[in-house]
Image (tube, grey):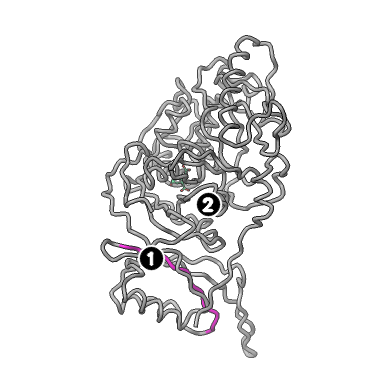
Amino acid sequence: MAAILSSHPPNQASVRAAATNPSSHPAHQLTLSSRPALPLRPRTRFPCVQCIYRPDFSGKGAIGSNRADWLSTCAILSSKVAVSKKQEETDKPVPGDGDSNKGVSGDEAGGKLSPVVSAVNGHISGSATLDLVPICNLPKALTISDLSPAPMHGSQLRVAYQGVPGAYSEAAAGRAYPNCEAIPCDQFEVAFQAVELWIADRAVLPVENSLGGSIHRNYDLLLRHRLHIVGEVQLPVHHCLLCLPGVRKEYLTRVISHPQALAQCEHTLTNLGLNVAREAFDDTAAAAEYVATNGLRDTAAIASSRAAELYGLQILADGIQDDSGNVTRFVMLAREPIIPRTDRPFKTSIVFAHDREGTSLLFKVLSAFAFRDISLTKIESRPHRNRPIRLVDDANVGTAKHFEYLFYLDFEASMAETRAQNALAEIQEFTSFLRVLGSYPMDMTPWNAPSSPSSASSPSPPL
Ligand SMILES: O=C(O)C(=O)C[C@]1(C(=O)O)C=C[C@@H](O)C=C1
C-alpha cells in the first residue's frame, strides 16, 4: 500500500519573522533556487519612493499601525516627493531600492529618467528627458524577505502570481478570479508561501506551455508545499516585441524576456532578422519594465500589449509567437481542496513514485486508467530528490545505476466518480507514494477567448 510522503514545508518561522518585521529580516536568510537556466540580469528598479512598513513602530508621528495606513501614507509621500523634486531639480538622486531604515528614499518619483541610469551595462540609454509613464503606483512584488500582508479591500479575493504587473500570470489571475486583487511576487516560491501564510487567498501559477513545455519548478514546488489545485486556466499567450518610442529594429542589439517567451518566439525573431543577443529575465513584464526604466534604445522586450501600455513602450511587432496555438496552462492553488463534482468536466492531478525493482510501474498505472476508459492529458517525470539513484548490483556484470523519478499525471475524471476512485485504489497497490494534488473543473473556454484580465471571463466559478 502507498504511504503518503511527508512534505518539506519552508522555514515558516523565519518567513513569519520577515512578515512581522521585514526591516529586521536580511534577504540572505532564505536562499531560493528558482532561477531559470539562463543567467538573469539584475533588475534595476524604477526610481521610486520606498516606505518601510514597521508594525512595531507606534511612536508620535508614526506612519500608521497597519499596512493599509502605511501604503496610503506611501502614496501621499510619493506625491509629495514628486512635487518637491520638481522644485528642487538640483537634488542628487539616490540609486537603488533605498535603505531599509529610512521611511523614504530619495529618488525621482515623477517618471523622468535619472542621469544615474542613463547608461546601463554598456547599453545605449535614452535621453534623460524621455517622458516615460510613471510606474511608482504599480504594486511592488512580494519578496522572500518581505512577505508582509497587502491591505484588505473588503471581500476582494487576493491572488498571488509570479511577476510584475503586465505579466501573463497577472492576466491568468484576472481570468481565474475576475475582480480579484492580484498580488505580484518575485518568485514562484513566494507565491506559494503567500497563500500558506494567509497573505493571499489563492495563487495562480504556470505549469506548462503548448510550445515551451513544462515549467518544472512549479511541479517540484507543488510537492514541497501543501496547497491544493482548485482550478486551471488556459491562457492564449500573444507576444509583442516592445521597445522605447522611436526605436527601430535596426537599432536593436539584444532581446530580453522570460526564457519561455524567448523560446516561444525564437523562429519569428530570426525571420525578422533579429539575430541579436537574447537575455533571460524573471518574467516578461519585468523585461519591459527594465527597458523602460533604463531608457534602453538598443534593447527590445518580449511581453504583452498590457506591459507596453503600463511601461510606455511601443509595439514594434505584434503576435511574434512561433505558433498561434501558444497557450499557457496555469493552476489555481488554495489552502483547502474543493469538493469534487460530477455535473461538469473535471480533471484530477496526482503524483506518485515506487521503490520496487523490476515492476513495470508505468505500464500498470496507464492500464489502470485505460481499463476504465479514463483519458490522460499529461504525464511528467521529475527526479526523485529524496532518493535520486537506485543501485542494482549484479555480481556478474557490475552495478546498474537507475535514476529514480516522481511521476505527475493529469486525467480527465473527477474524484467523485467511482471509476477514478477505483483507478487510484488499484494504483496504490503498486506505488510507494501517491498524492492527489487536486480534482478541479477543466477550463472549457473556447480558444479565441480574450486574454486580457479586464475583458476576460472566468473559466469556471471562482473556487
Ligand atoms: O513572464 C510572464 O509574463 C509569465 O507570466 C511567465 C510565463 C511562464 O512562466 O511561462 C507565462 C506565460 C508565458 O508562457 C511566458 C512566461
Compared with residue 208, is residue 376 higher up or lower down, i.e. above or below? below
Rounded to the nearest angstrom, the CA distance separating label 1 from label 2 is 21 Å
From the top left corner, tell me how far across and down residue 414 is, in percent.
Answer: 33, 67
Residue 95 is covered by the magenta coloring: no
Q: Is residue 50 visible?
A: yes
With 431 as the anchor, is 114 left or right in this view? right
From the top left corner, tell me how far across and down residue 359 is, in percent.
Answer: 48, 84
Residue drawn at x 53%, y 74% is 4
Compared with residue 200, is residue 400 higher up or lower down, i.e. above or below? below
Using the rendered view, name the quadrant where residue 48 is placed: top right
Q: Which residue is mark 1?
A: 348
Q: Which residue is mark 2?
A: 195
Amino acid type, callout 1: Thr
Residue 355 is covered by the magenta coloring: yes
User: Front-most of 354 and 316?
Assistant: 354
Quadrant location of the C terminus in the rendered image: bottom left
Q: Residues within 10 Å of mark 1 (few under 14, many from 20)?
A: many
Amino acid type, callout 2: Val
- Tell me the number on the disc at residue 378: none
User: Front-most of 247 and 3?
Assistant: 3
From the top left corner, tell me how far across and down residue 439 is, in percent.
Answer: 38, 64
Q: Residues within 10 Å of mark 2 (few under 14, many from 20)?
A: many
**Label 1 residue SS:** strand
Q: Is residue 37 visible?
A: no
